[in-house]
Image (spheres, rainbow, N blue to C red):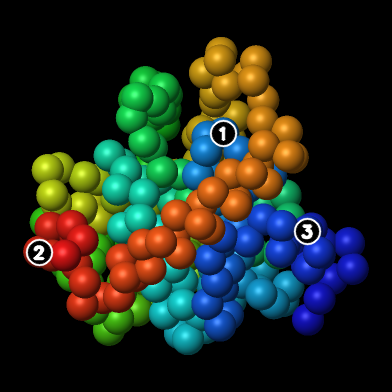
């Protein structure tokens, strides 16, 4: 299903922003990024409006893309989040992917936000705490994402205006999926809007974003073997 006035259903624009794609999911560079590498992950079909609408096959595509991008950017920390229910501004479901590549202003922003807002829901990550994302197999990933999907169904009535976040923290060679949380919408809004003074002044235009996309696609093509699950070392490093 394609919606005429939906920006994510505009195939012409999507091709300009496309970084990575699977059968049912796409990763595009955000047209109004807070940083280079601020990507948006979207299902191809417009009818997917909530995380709870995502099928198991799409969950697998989503995990594959997340795993590839996290491995590619080698970020100190990665923040992945999406709005739900009343918190959304677009009907077409989309996920924000923010690789926090140091040096960065993100740490101060996140520390401030974490002090101000309490998590609505508990951590739902059930696996070993120190577990590199490269070592998670598809069954574990799908099981985890199913839990998140069910959690959102359960909380849809009591917390309809929230943001779900995934933290992927890097400590040495370990990249740990530390938590899946649901928190108030204001925190997500602040994270999206927060920029350093330099970034506010520079404010990337469309041409800059398109050039970033070309560079990213070129870099990904050069490191294609990074996306082979058998090419990861125990700490996520490329073999």
**The C terminus is located in which quarter?**
bottom left
Residue positioned 20% across, 52% down in the render:
175
Residue positioned 78% across, 81% down in the render:
1
Picture layout, residue 22 above or below residue 204 = below
Marks 2/3: CA–CA distance: 38 Å
User: 56 left or right of 225?
Assistant: right
Q: Please give the residue where the numbered disc 3 appears in the rendered image.
A: 13
Q: Quadrant of residue 225?
A: bottom left
Label 2 sits on a secondary structure element that is loop
Residue positioned 73% across, 73% down in the render:
46
Q: Nearer the viewer, residue 160 or 50?
A: 50
Marked residue nearer the N-terminal end (2 or 3): 3
Q: Please give the residue where the numbered disc 1 appears in the rendered image.
A: 34
Task: Residue 63: tell me if it is visible.
Answer: no
Picture layout, residue 175 above or below residue 154 = above
User: 48 left or right of 59?
Assistant: right
Marked residue nearer the N-terminal end (1 or 2): 1
Return the x and y of residue 217 as percentages of the image width and height. 53, 58
Q: Which dot marks residue 234?
A: 2
Marks 1/2: CA–CA distance: 32 Å
Task: Residue 171: tell me if it is visible.
Answer: yes
Marked residue nearer the N-terminal end (3 or 1): 3
Q: Nearer the viewer, residue 137 or 209?
A: 209
Picture layout, residue 187 above or below residue 16 = above
Return the x and y of residue 44 as percentages of the image width and height. 66, 75
Return the x and y of residue 88 as percentages of the image width and height. 67, 52
Which one is closest to the eye, mark 1 or mark 2? 2
User: 177 left or right of 149?
Assistant: left
- Verify CB contact (< 8 Å) between mark 3 and mark 1: no
């Amino acid at each position: 299903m394609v919606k005429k006035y939906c920006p994510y259903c505009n195939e012409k624009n999507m091709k300009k922003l496309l970084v990575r794609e699977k059968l049912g999911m796409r990763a595009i560079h955000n047209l109004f990024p807070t940083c280079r590498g601020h990507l948006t992950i979207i299902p191809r079909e417009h009818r997917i409006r909530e995380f709870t609408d995502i099928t198991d096959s799409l969950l697998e595509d989503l995990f594959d893309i997340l795993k590839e991008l996290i491995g590619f950017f080698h970020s100190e920390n990665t923040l992945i989040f999406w709005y739900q229910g009343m918190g959304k501004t677009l009907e077409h479901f989309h996920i924000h992917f923010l690789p926090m590549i140091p040096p960065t202003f993100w740490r101060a922003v996140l520390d401030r936000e974490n002090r101000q807002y309490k998590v609505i829901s508990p951590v739902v990550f059930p696996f070993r705490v120190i577990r590199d994302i490269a070592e998670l197999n598809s069954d574990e990933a799908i099981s985890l994402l199913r839990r998140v999907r069910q959690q959102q169904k359960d909380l849809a009535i009591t917390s309809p205006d929230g943001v779900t976040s995934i933290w992927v923290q890097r400590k040495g060679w370990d990249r740990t999926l530390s938590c899946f949380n649901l928190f108030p919408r204001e925190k997500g809004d602040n994270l999206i809007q927060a920029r350093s003074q330099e970034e506010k002044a520079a404010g990337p235009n469309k041409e800059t974003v398109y050039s970033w996309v070309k560079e990213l696609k070129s870099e990904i093509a050069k490191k294609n073997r990074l996306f082979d699950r058998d090419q990861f070392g125990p700490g996520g490093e490329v073999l």
